[in-house]
Image (cartoon, helix red, strand yellow):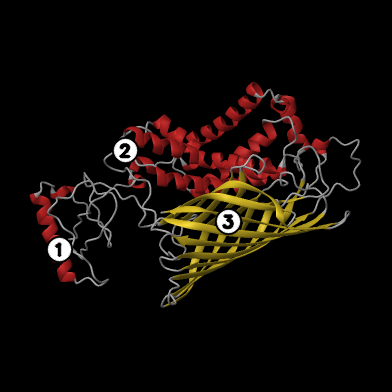
């Protein structure tokens, strides 16, 4: 579990049903206060009351007023410097909603990007006027021909900025969703001379919600308003990289440099535990399934597991999510080679018996695979597929411990893909060499932990995307490609991904990272010859975990 460990000891007192509990972020404890060792999970109430009275007496003798001892319910007492909450979400000022301020920030995002395109890039599509706006509204939506990364990553990321303009102004998850939709609708109809794209509206809205909520919550892990100087600058900078709109909001409000003694933390690790890992090393990707013909590059992987999937108390949208980011450090392959996000929208327990638990829920999915032809190899693109907007049911099952197998979880997900993209072997219009459409996916994930030895994960993901609207029957020579309005080559594409990862522990936080993936693609075309393509990649590196 990722925890801040700035403390020497936590002194907390319960006068009724009291308990002594080690926790985060203690500012002062007298040296004479020694925490008794706990040899078992059973605590005698009389002993606890005696311990509480003992530590209260020592605290008062040390000069800590009783009024500064915050008593919290449950088994989670805390010591705050002035008796107030340490958490920013308890601050009444942060509980206020500012919907119009959020709308102005979403408007500023669109205006700023449009001004950059017009002034800096001198882009023709940014030279708008009332006639272009009227034409866009009258013409209606089409399927555009932007490149894969633009349509299926950049647009969802842009939607996350709209979403966070609301989240950083006090709006909750569901209240922030319309901002992604309306921000995208404004851009598509008003701020480009090109016809509005229906795929952009879907990807920006739905994908933007997923990316926006995850980046908002990850930024909560970074901020700490007690810090000063260089440590404070670093946390503010990292927070700005993760969630830029929130950082701008903090600068405008002055929170970026305000030092607090109360309400200084933005995440409660006891309520929502977090696991974080970062791995770096060498990745080999094969050319057209050839063992000895491929390309090697450095890689960076970042993984976050946020919340407890079996928690009944924390069941708001994205109180549980996983995020996995893969970056390629070579010049030939894409910088972002993979992004895999899973966020729980709702769940409920369906089975609890001893150490066995089963949780059913509905989840939002965002998966993105991208690659380029191997350098000095064939022209075959290894794989490329995305589900930018997907949602569906899922089951997470936890088994009891068995010998050295300290943890075993099985996960099964089925989701409907509202918008996805898959590599095309024939369609090539403007910047697009892929098909778009809708479909479904299945995911089966097995996670095993072997105590201090390491962990093993086995995964199988299957994607099927149907391209419904082709370009057959259209006169391509006389049709403006901007108005071709085609999803691509009519047919369907399937991608089956087998992935395994083994982590061998070298120390408490450092482990060896071994992983491999096999990709099997089959694309069925209505008017072209079908294509089958297989390949694999493998990684080895070092991982640091918290």
Q: Residue at x 22, y 47 (%)?
A: 83
Q: Name the quadrant containing residue 136.
A: top right
Which residue is labeled 3 in the image?
364
Residue at image point 77% right, 35% down: 138
Say which of marks 2 and 3 sits in front: 2
Question: In this figure, which residue is indicated by the disc labeled 1?
Answer: 51
Q: Local crowd at mark 1 within 10 Å, few (<14), some, or many (≥20)?
A: some
- Which quadrant of the rendered structure holds the C terminus? bottom left
- Mark closer to the chain start, 1 or 3: 1
**Residue drawn where x is 38% and y is 42% of the image:** 223
> What distance separates the C-alpha of mark 1 from that of mark 2?
32 Å
> Disc 2 marks which residue?
227
Q: Secondary structure at mark 2?
A: loop
How packed mark 2 is, by other alpha carbons closer than 10 Å (few <14, some 14-19, many 20 or more), is some
On the rendered structure, is 436 left or right of 221? right
Q: Position of residue 10 (x, y in %)?
A: 22, 54
Residue 98 in sight in this render: no
In percent of width and height, residue 519 lies at 69, 59
SS at badge 3:
strand
Q: Earlier in the sequence, mark 1 or mark 2?
A: 1
Res. 525 image quadrant: bottom right
Q: Which secondary structure, mark 1?
A: helix
Q: CA distance from mark 1 to mark 3?
A: 46 Å
């Amino acid at each position: 579990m990722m925890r801040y460990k700035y403390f020497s000891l936590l002194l907390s007192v319960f006068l009724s049903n009291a308990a002594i509990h080690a926790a985060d972020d203690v500012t002062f404890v007298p040296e004479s206060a020694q925490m008794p060792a706990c040899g078992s999970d059973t605590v005698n109430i009389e002993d606890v009351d005696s311990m509480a009275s003992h530590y209260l007496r020592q605290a008062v003798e040390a000069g800590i007023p009783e009024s500064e001892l915050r008593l919290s319910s449950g088994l989670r007492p805390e010591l705050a410097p002035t008796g107030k909450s340490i958490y920013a979400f308890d601050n009444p000022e942060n509980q206020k909603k500012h919907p119009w301020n959020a709308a102005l920030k979403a408007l500023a995002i669109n205006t700023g990007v449009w001004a950059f395109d017009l002034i800096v890039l001198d882009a023709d599509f940014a030279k708008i006027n009332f006639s272009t706006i009227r034409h866009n509204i009258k013409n209606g939506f089409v399927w555009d021909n932007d490149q894969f990364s633009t349509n299926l990553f950049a647009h969802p990321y842009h939607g996350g900025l709209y979403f966070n303009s609301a989240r950083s102004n006090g709006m909750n998850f569901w209240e922030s969703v319309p901002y992604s939709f309306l921000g995208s609708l404004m851009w598509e109809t008003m701020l480009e001379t090109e016809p509005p794209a229906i795929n952009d509206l879907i990807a920006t809205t739905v994908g933007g919600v997923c990316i926006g909520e995850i980046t908002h919550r990850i930024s909560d892990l970074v901020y700490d308003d007690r810090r000063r100087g260089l440590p404070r600058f670093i946390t503010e900078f990292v927070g700005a990289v993760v969630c830029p709109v929130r950082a701008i909001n903090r600068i405008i409000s002055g929170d970026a440099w305000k030092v607090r003694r109360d309400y200084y933390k933005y995440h409660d690790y006891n309520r929502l535990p977090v696991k974080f890992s970062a791995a770096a090393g060498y990745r080999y990707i094969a050319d057209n399934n050839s063992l000895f013909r491929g390309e090697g590059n450095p890689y960076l992987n970042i993984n976050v597991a946020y919340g407890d999937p079996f928690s009944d108390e924390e069941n708001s949208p994205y109180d549980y999510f996983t995020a996995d980011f893969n970056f390629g450090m070579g010049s030939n392959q894409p910088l972002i080679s993979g992004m895999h996000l899973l966020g729980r929208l709702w769940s409920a327990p369906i089975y609890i018996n001893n150490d066995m638990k089963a949780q059913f829920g509905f989840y939002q999915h965002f998966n993105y695979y991208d690659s380029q032809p191997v350098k000095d190899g064939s022209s075959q693109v290894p794989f490329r597929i995305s589900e930018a907007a997907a949602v569906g049911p899922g089951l997470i099952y936890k088994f009891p411990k068995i010998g050295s197998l300290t943890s075993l979880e099985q996960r099964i997900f089925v989701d409907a893909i509202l918008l996805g993209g898959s590599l095309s072997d024939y369609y090539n219009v403007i910047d697009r060499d892929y098909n778009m459409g809708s479909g479904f996916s299945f995911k089966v994930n097995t996670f095993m932990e072997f105590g201090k030895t390491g962990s093993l994960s086995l995964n199988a993901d299957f994607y099927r995307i149907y391209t419904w609207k082709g370009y057959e029957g259209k006169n391509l020579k006389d049709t403006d490609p901007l108005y071709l309005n085609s999803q691509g080559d009519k047919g369907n594409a399937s991608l089956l991904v087998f992935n395994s990862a083994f982590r061998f522990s070298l120390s408490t936080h450092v482990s060896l990272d071994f992983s491999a993936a096999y990709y099997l693609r089959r694309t069925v075309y209505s008017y072209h010859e079908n294509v089958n393509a297989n390949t694999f990649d493998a990684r080895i590196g070092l991982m640091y975990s918290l």
